[in-house]
Image: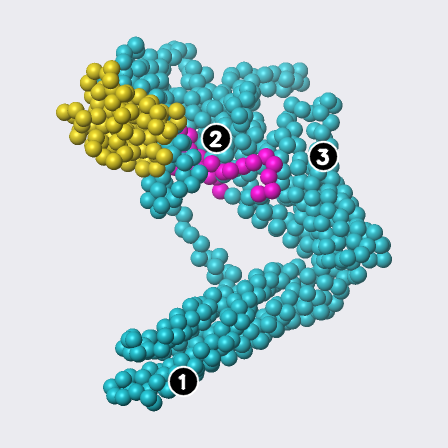
Chain colours: A yellow, B cyan
Amino acid sequence: LHVRFCVVPSPYADEIAQIAREFAAMDPNARRVVVAGEDDYPEEEVAVAIADVANPGAVVLTQAGNVYAVLDVDDARNGGLIDLSFAKARIA
Amino acid sequence: MKRLLLILFVAMPALGQGRPYILSVEEIPQGNANAILCPQTSADCSADILSTLQITPNLANVPRPATATASLNADEASDGQRRAHLNEALGELNQSLDLSRQIIERHGAGEQSEALEAMSDQFARLRIALNDAVVKYLAVDRPGEDIQRGEEYRAAFRTPSATGQWLAEQIRTLDQRAAARAAAGGLQLRLAAARVRANAPPEPLHLPGYDTYEPLSVTPIQRITFNVSSEERARNAADVQATAAIVSLVRTNFKALADAYKKQLADARARVDAALGAVRQSVARNGDLNVPVAMLAKDLNDLAAGASEPLKSQLTKTAADTTTLAATVQTTISALTAAQTSLASVPSKLDSSSMNVAAGRPDLVLDNVLGIAAGAQTTVTSTIAALRSAHDVLPPQLAAVESDLRALGANAPAVGSLVVARVRADLIEAIVAPIRDLDATKLILGALGNRNAASSAKTAGPVADVSAPQVTTVANPMPTRLEIARTDPRDNDTIDLAAQVLDGANGVVYEEHRSVRVRFYGWHSGLSSGLVFVRAQETAQENLKPEAAAIWRIVRTPRPWEDNWRHWYFRARPAVGMHLTTLHFGGDNDAVQFGLGVSAHLFDDFFQLGYGWNLGSTTRRGYGYFGLGVMKILRDALAGR
């Protein structure tokens, strides 16, 4: 099971997906990036998670499918925070 | 005068101990128990093999002229902190990248395992630690700021590959500052470590922050384990063999030589046994293969007789090709049967007990062994030739029949393709394994007769890599750690720590060496050997005759400070374990037997007692022994010379 980095639709979605994929590629066994429209994009969980967040950029789900973190657009473009979210969600 | 000398004699040790070393060495035991500080005024100390050494340089202890500044490095403390965080980050980054490569490779190969999951967990921990170290580094200059939202942090993690470059830039900046300070008159430090082992050249070790050597991987060491390292196994095997050689000296001078040959012959025998097993299976499976192939040829001929052209010609050609194949199959099966018969006699020829025939005549042992090897080699060579010939001839004939059957299409007999598949899978493939085993056997047997082979192998060793990594000069001395398990350690190794202090003009102003002896302290398992004197339960069988024993035992090595009456085991060094020993129930001319049992040792394996049972006997199997750890004594004596 993977930690899923779900890219929320936004003007920066492509940029976020690209950098997140680079960090996900370091551990293909545990990390995965999904964007809106893909089969395993969890529409409902993401919608609930970003309900009260201004400028949501991504939602990080643990292996069990629980929401680990919601990153705003600014944080979701920050490679260090992407890497850290992947790692912390893995051992959460 | 005498009084002056006496005063000097008494005062010198005190003078020597007046100044502490600039290197402070702490042993951090496994499991992060309380650190043990090596005496600060003694050059030597010891540490457990599973511990980590924390080495802290302190340039304030460098002897300096009274006019010099007290602490030239006081204003560099923040750079010291920065460098420590950067080194930590660099370590985490390197480990995580290494792990990432492994994960990608194994995941790409389709692996799904608990081991891979554990690697992903470890990767996550390393990335968290890397992130943390970078944050701490940046926080040195920006205390209280939200580091992770800053531009520098973003730059450090712009992409996965950017982090290494960013760290290198930061380290370069620190180095430039350090060089500038050094030019202004500050002290610099060079720190190096090496593992010193008896009868081996010193091995340089990596000290994080002080050199560019590659770190060694951690040697898996367990306190109590039946898994014995290959080195310890080899050492013990050598000890047991050497003990056996001593025993042999008592029995016959040539037994040691025979033992060496026995070992090789046993290997050859195992391979012949494997080949014979494969051939037997193949004969059992294919003994009736002649019948279906011959039947196929007959069916094709019958069909051709009743057919009209052009089908008749096609069937006739297929029948002819199948008849040729049938003949070769028959030849091959005959060859396999012959190989089975001839190989069946080889293992008994290679049976090491056959060498005991000459035990009473040492001068005949060598000739006997070489004669056995030569006889077996002839059989093996001819068998390989027969099998290889069959293996090479069958495929083209089989291909011809296959091509014919394809051309016949629906007119081909239904069993045709089945017979072809069986010939390929059961006969051709089955011959491959025996050929491989017998080829290896031929090499072993050939080597037995070739006395130049061993010396040729020795001269063809690898050439040492001399692309020398460097010990670097550091202007910001900081603590560093050395995991002893990363030094490929053995009990009684010594780790030498050398420090050189340089001034602004790169002149050495001070140098010191400290050494840490590596010991396996506490309870631990290991191998031992003994020259034991066996007394059988039935003393007529064997009565206090020397034998060689290999022992696995658990022993407790006490710390030096346990040398007092409360720790009786300090001197007694008790150990308990299990042994395997050679036996000669029934006299010297009988084949060697083996006994298995329990053992108890005292005084560091010197004095040994054991009780066991002869595995080669069904009645009156019991025996007892007392023994001496002669090889250990000899090794210690030689090491002390």
Residue B502: give x, y in percent of width and height. 37, 24
Quadrant (top left/top right/bottom left/bottom right) for the C terminus of chain B: top right
Mark nearest the camera among 1 and 2 is: 1
Q: Is residue B93 left or right of residue B265?
A: left
Q: How many marks?
A: 3
Q: Which label number is shown at residue B483?
A: 2
How far apart, in angstroms, are the residues tagged by discs 3 and 1? Answer: 80 Å
Q: Which mark is residue B298?
A: 1
- Chain of residue at mark 1: B
Alpha-carbon span between mark 1 and mark 2: 76 Å
State yes or no: residue B225 in magenta: yes
B485 in relation to B65, above or below:
below
Give the class, few, some or many, for how many residues have Cα within 10 Å of label 1's Cα (few <14, many ≥20). some
Q: Is residue B286 above or below residue B576?
A: below
Residue B566 screen position, x and y as percent:
73, 22
Q: Nearer the viewer, residue A87 or B472?
A: A87
Give SS at disc 2: strand
Residue beneath disc 3: B574
Residue at the image position 65 percent from the left and 64 percent from the top: B352
Q: Residues within 10 Å of mark 2 (few under 14, many from 20)?
A: many
Please state the extent of the stretch shown in magenta in the rendering.
Answer: B201-227
Sequence-first disc among 3 and 1: 1
| Quadrant the N terminus of chain B occupies | top right
